[in-house]
Amino acid sequence: EFRPRARPKSDNDKLNLVNYLIGVERNPVLFELGDVSVSEGFFGAPSLSRRGMHLKLDKLQDLGVAVHGFATSYETTAGHYPFFGVDNDDSVLVGGALLVSLFKDRELLKLHGLWARGHRFSSSPGSNVGTIASGERGEIVSFGTSSAFFGGQLKLSTEIAFSEFDTNVLDEVRDEADKAYRAKLEGTRDLGVVLEAPITTRPSFEYSMVGFRFRSPANPGIQPDRVGWTFKDDTVWKIITFTWGYSSFEDNTDSLTTLPTVRTYTWDGVLALAP
């Protein structure tokens, strides 16, 4: 007698959640739930992608004020848990931002403030509930400005940020404080016309300093202990774009005698055709 063999059960057959996003909007309020994207400042949360909630109240053009708030998981999420992002108390990131434009020309001067705080705790397998085996926590506050002059041909942006971060909540070292700041000037200028096509150049200059102990809970990819400047220029004519730049950076921002200072100088150039 022939009996077909039953297919073995596997956990891989189960349906799992990759990502999702639900948005509810009623002008001027936008509420998002799921895998949200937060872009606030340069040091704080310039490109944060986490699962959680994001609330935007945008009255910038009418009243000159915009308010943003977010509550997400501290780490990236894979699968269905945590479904709402903040339902895991051991991995939470919360923050808010305020954007104010003081003049009728909203691009003339914008003020930006950001606050974010987060932590990540983990327990070893088999440990008692509530026993922390490792973890980190931190907080950041940043203030920035952005201005546009001459119809957007000249732009200036600045930012300063202060952080307190504890990379290991179990050791005796408490939160370490540090700062970071930057200023960027960029412009656009027409150089003339060649073969009935304009030549446009877009130069930019940026100076930045990130302290030795600076960390951001909402921007884990930022490189600490770095100071220097960079110049970049894009020249466009028809389908041709020529990009070149120079940068100079060094580390050991605290000038510690026990550490060497590494200086890096970089030239780069790119010629691109976009038919």
Image (spheres, grey):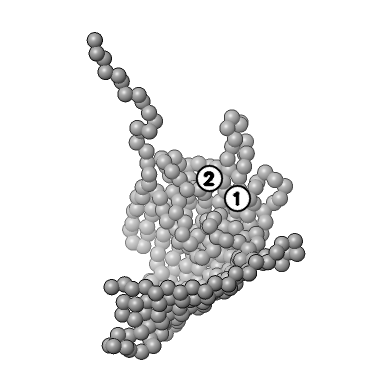
Q: Is residue 235 left or right of residue 144?
A: left
Quadrant, the C terminus: bottom left
Query: Residue at image x 55%, y 68%?
Result: 143
| Picture disc at residue 8 | none
Q: Position of residue 261 (x, y in %)?
A: 68, 66
Marks 1 & 2, CB-CB < 8 Å contact: no
Q: Is residue 12 left or right of residue 185?
A: left
Residue 151 shows up from this direction:
no
Query: Residue at image x 45%, y 41%?
Result: 82
| Picture disc at residue 137 | 1
Q: Position of residue 140 (x, y in %)?
A: 58, 59
Query: Residue at image x 49%, y 76%?
Result: 245
| Picture disc at residue 91 | 2
Q: Amino acid at mark 1?
A: Arg
The mark total stands at 2
Q: Nearer the viewer, residue 180 or 234?
A: 234
State the image quarter where residue 59 is shown: bottom left
